[in-house]
Image (tube, rainbow, N blue to C red):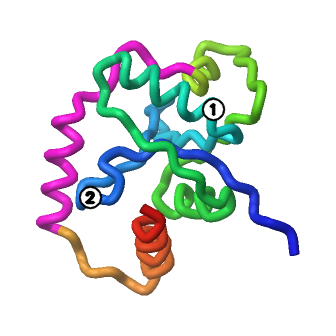
């Protein structure tokens, strides 16, 4: 049996009710970075922290599960391979965060609003909910 490929993602408020995954808005798309190397993810987290962004936690998760999660959530999963060298301005955002970031108080308020108005889970969302619970269990 082949071991699953792991990727490293950045989580905020890991283990809390307001847990979130780091994402970028690129040309109207929400992109989640899947780092091949933990060191690259930790460096990116350090760059976010240097910009006074909340410090994310680096978590290793199965690549196929993260890609499925992103697809179901309407996000684009972007794999950042070891030794990645950007060729465009957009690709540079895969190794260094933008200089301007979203106001974190806004997404925390949105999270709180969503928790208060959380809809019931349909059968189509059951797999996504199960994956979310497995993610929480890892923390």
Residue shown at 45% from the left, 20% from the top:
47
Which quarter of the rendered picture does the C terminus lie within?
Answer: bottom left
Provide residue 44's location: percent of width, then percent of height: 52, 27
Provide residue 4's location: percent of width, then percent of height: 75, 64
Front position in the image: 39 or 76: 39
Residue 2 shown in magenta? no
Q: Which residues are magenta?
A: 96-117
Provide residue 21's location: percent of width, then percent of height: 42, 47
Write down the quadrant of residue 48 in the picture. Answer: top left
**Local crowd size for mark 2, using a 10 Å CA cut-off: few (<14), some (14–19), many (≥20):** few
Q: Residue furthest right?
A: 1
Which quarter of the rendered picture does the N terminus lie within?
Answer: bottom right
Residue topped by disc 1: 39
Front position in the image: 99 or 90: 99
Would residue 74 be found to the left or right of residue 2 on screen? left
Give the answer, above or below, for where 42 lies relative to 86: below
Mark 1 element type: helix
**Local crowd size for mark 1, using a 10 Å CA cut-off: few (<14), some (14–19), many (≥20):** few
Would residue 114 be found to the left or right of residue 14 on screen? left
Residue shown at 21% from the left, 70% from the top:
118
Write down the quadrant of residue 56 in the picture. Answer: top left
Residue 108 shown in magenta? yes
Residue shown at 59% from the left, 52% from the top:
60
Mark 2 element type: loop
Provide residue 127's location: percent of width, then percent of height: 50, 78
The disc at residue 16 is 2
């Amino acid at each position: 049996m082949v071991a699953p490929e792991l990727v490293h993602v950045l989580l905020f408020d890991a283990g809390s009710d307001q847990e979130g995954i780091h994402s970028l808005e690129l040309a109207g798309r929400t992109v989640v970075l899947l780092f091949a190397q933990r060191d690259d993810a930790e460096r990116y987290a350090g760059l976010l922290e240097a910009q006074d962004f909340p410090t994310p936690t680096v978590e290793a998760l199965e690549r196929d599960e993260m890609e499925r999660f992103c697809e179901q959530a309407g996000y684009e999963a972007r794999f950042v391979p070891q030794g990645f060298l950007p060729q465009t301005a957009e690709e540079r955002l895969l190794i260094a965060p933008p200089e301007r970031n979203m106001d974190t108080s806004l997404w925390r308020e949105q999270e709180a609003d969503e928790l208060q108005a959380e809809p019931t889970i349909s059968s189509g969302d059951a797999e996504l909910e199960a994956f979310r619970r497995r993610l929480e269990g890892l923390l």
